Image: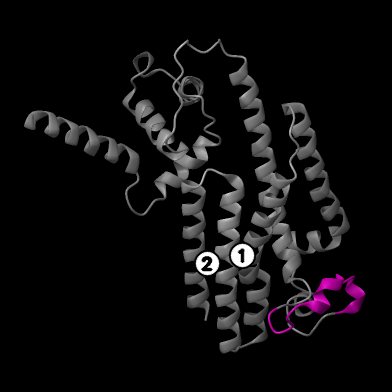
Amino acid sequence: MQTKINKLISELNEQLNFIDLEIDNQLIRCENAIEIILKTIKILRTIVHKNNFKAEGEEIQFFKELKPQFTSKLIYYNMVYKIEMKKPNGGNRVVKKYYQNELLKLKAFFDNELDFYKYYRSGSTYLDYKYFLRGKFDIKLSLDSYYFETDSTFSTSHDFKVARILANDLIQLYIENQFVQIDHKDDREKMNKKPSINLSWTNSKVALTELLYALHAEGVFNNGNADIKDIATYLEHIFNIDLGDYYRTYLELRMRKTSRTKFLSSLTESLIKKMDEADEK
């Protein structure tokens, strides 16, 4: 069973990485991710129902370490979707305040679950038999009401709390990254007025990120002394686009199992085709 679950989480991570790379719209990205995660959790549930845990230790490991890897992703994408859906229209100051309030909500959850946070983060195990074995709940442990409505064959009293902790860490990183992008946007708006001829980038941000890092690697600007951030800011300005967290995109490009330079390869093919067609005339 362990092998099947590890394969399942690996396949899920690969699909989510693909979505993050190929879909720029955050809401559509979340919708697609949630759909895939729900299907994967359904498969996970089937695996658990068809295979018995060999010992209590194996059951505890599943509900403490394995299942939360799946459900935390569901919580993360669902919460990001809600955050972006409710994001107010307004200037950068208004949006920043909105994100700050979302961080306060994360802190409120942390404060409310402080004892369990300490237990989980410290690596403690003395209450695992109550927290992560099915049917072993203790009403004195301040259980959430939703626990009594869950599938008792696929849930314990605290596996969802672990998933929420993991998801909150990701959400905090997401919001902090939004602050960085807002500040970056402010910097771009302070740049000199655009040239009279406007060209807007109409391909994907991933494609431009490939080009960005290729130009930097080749050292085509300032005799190779131009910083990647300066090149990114320049391309964003002249092509009227926000690349977002381009370094994260670059890391995901490196993780591609197929062509890591799909756009650059396409450029080469298109140019060669154009030359060949010109030669035939």
Q: How is the image coloured?
A: one colour
Give the magenta-colored segment's residue range: 138-154
Closer to us: 183 or 122: 183
The secondary structure type at the circle numbered 2 is helix
* Residue 224 position (above or below residue 139): above
Extreme residue toward the right, this view: 140
Residue 280: name its quadrant: top left
Residue 51 seen from this side: no
Q: Which residue is mark 1?
A: 69
Badge 2 amino acid: Ile
Q: Is residue 98 left or right of residue 265?
A: right
- Looking at the picture, how far across and down is residue 82, in whole percent? 72, 51
Amino acid type, label 1: Gln
Residue 49 picture location, percent across and down: 60, 86
Disc 2 crowd rating (10 Å Cα; few below 14, some 14-19, many 20+) is: some
* The one of 6 and 249 positioned closer to us in this rendering: 249
Residue at horizontal 75%, vertical 30%?
90
Q: Look at mark 2 in the image and give the residue it sits on.
A: 9
